[in-house]
Structures are given as C-alpha cells and as structure tokens.
Amino acid sequence: MRIRSLGVIDDAVVELSPGFTAVTGETGAGKTMVVTSLGLLLGGRADPALVRLGAKSAVVEGRITVPEGAAAALRAEEAGAELDDGALLVSRTVSAEGRSRAHLGGRSVPVGVLAELADDLVAVHGQSDQQGLLKPARQRGALDRYAGDAVAVPLAKYTAAYRRLRAVSAELDEITTRARERAQEADMLRFGLDEIAAVEPRPGEDTELAAEAERLGHAEALASAATAAHAALAGNPEDPEGVDASTLVAGAHRALETVRSHDPALAALADRIGEIGILLADVAGELAGYADDLDADPLRLAAVEERRAALTQLTRKYGEDVGAVLAWAEAGAARLAELEGDDDRLEELTAERDALRAELAGLARALTEARVEAAARFAAAVTEELASLAMPHARVTIDVRQTDDPDGVEIDGRTVAYGPAGVDEVELLLAPHPGAPPRPIAKGASGGELSRVMLAVEVVFAGTDPVPTYLFDEVDAGVGGKAAVEIGRRLAKLAKSAQVVVVTHLPQVAAFADRQLLVEKTHDGSVTRSGVQVLEGEDRVRELSRMLAGQEDSQTARAHAEELLATARADT
C-alpha cells in the first residue's frame, strides 16, 4: 500500500509479506494507520478528520493479488475493473471536505463495490472494526467447511431439493393466488375461440375474397373492356368491313410466304409473324371466354362482402390477417388447455410439494446432526487454543439452533424455519470465565480478548476459510510472557495458509513474523516514505531490543531479542 496525507503519515509505502507481517513502532507513530488505510481500501467510512492537516485530501493505493476465477475477481470484472497481471489496483481518496472517491482496476466505482469485495479479501479483527466470522452466516459457512463431507454431501442434496421446492411452491402460489385472473383469461380465450370457430376462416381466404370483390364490383367495365379488346384482335361480327389485328397479321404472313424461299432471313420473319397470328388467336379466344364467364351477379357480390366483414371482425381483434388469426387460435387453444388443467396440475404440485417438504426435513435433520458433531469438535479445539493465549478459563461453544415457524418444515415434532442452507442458525458463543453465561463472541469479550478469540478461531479454521488475508489489531492487548509467545506461534501457523498482518507492541509476537515493518516519525512528527522500513538483521534485533526494554543498545535486551528470533525460527 501507498499512503499519503493520512493522519500522521505524510507519504509512506507499506510492503506486506505473503506470509506473516508484523507492524511495530513507538506509541503514536502511526501503526494504526495501516489498519485505517486497509479499511479505506475495503470500503470503510471516510472520515475527513483523517486527512493530514494542511493537505487537500488523503490517498490510499493498494495492489491486491486475486486468484483468477475468485469471487472477488469476478465481481471486480462485473464493475468494469481490469486485473493487472493477476492483481487488482485499488485506490481511495478522501478530501478534507468529506468527499470520497474509489477506483478499482483503473475504473471509477462506487465505494460500495469495495465493501462488497471486502468479505472475500480480508478478515479484520480489532476493537473497532470487526468483519468476517462475526457474521452469523459466515460462521455457519465456516463450520460447514470445517465439517467437510459430513455436511457437504447432505447440504448438496438439501440445496437441490430446496430449489425444486421453491419452484413448485412458486407455481402453486401463482395458480392459487391468480385463480380469478386465470379464470377470466380462460373465459376470454373461450369467447375468442368460439368466435373464430363460428366463422371458420381458411388460410388465405381474406386475400381471395378481396380479389373476387374487386372483380365483381367492376364486372360491367371488365366485360366491356374484354369485348372491345376481342373485337380489335379478331374483328366485330356486326362490322364485317372493319379491320382487325388478326386479319392484318394474316395478310402480312401471306405476303411473306410467297417469297420466303428466296431469303432465309425473310423466312424467319415470316415464321415469327405466323407465331404472332397464333398468339393473337389464343388471346382473342380467352377474351371471348372471359367476357362470357364474367358473373355480374349482385347477390354473389353481397355474399362476398358479408363474408369479408365477418373476417374483418376477426382480424380487428386477433391478428392483422386471417393467417395471424389462425395462429392466435392455435396458441389460445394450447393456453386454454393449460388453464383448464389447473385442477389436475394443482393436485400434482401439492403432492410434489408435500413430498419435497418431507425430504427436506430428513436432509435438514442430517445437516443438523453433522453440524452439532462438528461444532463440538470445533469448540473443544478453540477452547484448547485459548488456554495457550492467556485465556485459560474461557470456553467457546457453538450454538446450533432452530427457530419455530408455522410455515416451516416439521422436524422431531417442531415446525421450524428453513432456508437455502438448512434449518440451523449457527452462532459462536464465549464464556470468558467460569460462571459467566455464554454470549455471542462480539459481546462476550473485550477488544484484546476478542482478537485472541478470533485468532484461535482462525487457527482452527485454517485452510477452510477462503479469505486470503487476516489483519489483527490489539491481538496482544493485556498479555505478555509465555502467552505472547504462543500468540506469535499461532499467528505464524495461520500464516502458512494465508497472509497475516499484525499491529503489535510485543516483541514475542513480532519475532515470529516473516517480515517486520517499523513505523517511525521524523523530527517534525510526520511519517515519510523512509519512515516505514523493512527490518532485517541487526536493525530487527535493535527494534526487538527496544520493544523488550525500551533500550536499543542494552546487551541483555539484545541477547533476549536474538533468543526470541532463534526460537521463532526453530518453531517455524
């Protein structure tokens, strides 16, 4: 991360190890700004009071490695972000006036998008900012992963049955709650189908009738035109002296026939004129037949117009032409059959729903049994961890319970609420000392105790929780000596399966880190780029000595610091 103008930090770069990073420094040096900066990158609340005095805005930039195909990567791509060589570039700007801007993968995004990514990227455990396993849904998911196949197998079957039950129930609700609308729809379909059946339209009938009506409406004009055309082609019997086309063509043909043997070209023209004469004779014959067959019956015209009017009534309601009306009738008949089959379908769906609820109850019972068994193992393991973390009398339990719901499923004589993950509500409880009632871990422990409880939980869950980074603040509050060494040892153990960042005052914890960062102010009270150092070799021994005795050059403290580092290296 690069941090600029945030709190006491002027401009600094924080390089975190893939394993265990410890952030140390004097009180007030700005160590908690690491936690604050990460919180801003994860969509936390933007407080203008965080902006360094005299600066216009504070800026935090981070580069987060995200596995390809991970939920966070997919959500970022949905927001338009692009990955840079497998990493997300995230930035957050907070102005002194209180305005806030967020960028993800080079794209400006709402701050809420960063918050959506937070649960899949970092689990923060500290006094003022709690995420991850403090959420009941996350606790149940983590317990299920801890339980393994004992929960995964029945959960997969339960999920499939639950989805089918939701679909069946939705269809049942749709049929029953919309019974009146469906009955009205059926009545409208019956009316329309009856109206169409009464007319009995044929495909293309409207086009045929339109042509016939046009012909009948102009019968006299058509007959007169056909007669005149026939007379022009074949002659008029009432005018034997008149000249017609057939006579003229025949004369032309005879004139050429007498000389056609003298020139093939002229013979070809004579043949073509002969063809014209034949064509004229054919057309003249058809014109005579057309005029004779033409029916000017007004009764037939009235019948055609009446039929067209009936078809128009249908096309006005059910389609732009008779073909569309027939298509509507086909679809309407299928829909009516579906609606009229509601009673049978209702009976089938009710039977399927009852069977699915019974199946769901059996699978939910198996889920509960597997979770209760896993919860007992988990609680014992966490309680054992706490004994080594200066909480020897604390006891962690997991409450696996159900909520009564009259609309739920029946299990062992109770009707309980159910959801996509079963009927169980899972909650981690803590009794910090004998006689104390178990309470939710967020309420049953102080800030430092809570961080240690969550450390113990995360160590037990190591490898099952998909969150790749853990940040612990105040995990060492109120402890020292052997307990501090155990905290460091467990943080190192957790770092074998995830990235771990710890803000600490304890050298026993810092000694176990793969990388130790020192935050220190300059003489003017600010933290600059050079004020966040990666400590190695002699520098790390000197810082651990300061943390042990407040004196970097104390030989006793240096010997103790070297012993701590040697112990940590031997353990890890």
Image: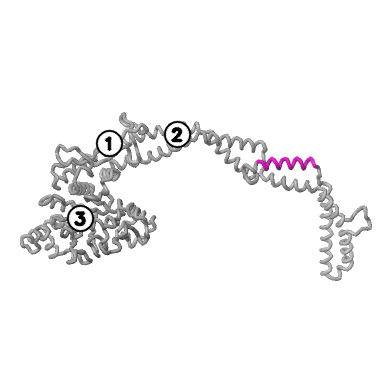
The span shown in magenta is 298-313
Q: Point out the frontmost of discs 2 and 1.
A: 1
| Residue ID at (21%, 64%) | 527
Q: Is residue 140 left or right of residue 437?
A: right
Label 2: state its secondary structure.
helix
| Residue ID at (6%, 62%) | 554
What amino acid type is highlighted by mark number 3? Val
For the image shown, how many numbered marks are present on the structure? 3
Q: Is residue 29 above or below residue 199?
A: below
Spatial distance from mark 2 to mark 1, Cα to Cα? 31 Å
Q: Is residue 299 magenta?
A: yes
Q: Is residue 315 above or below residue 568?
A: above
Label 3: state its secondary structure.
strand
Q: Which mark is residue 349?
A: 2
Spatial distance from mark 3 to mark 2, Cα to Cα? 56 Å
What amino acid type is highlighted by mark number 2? Leu
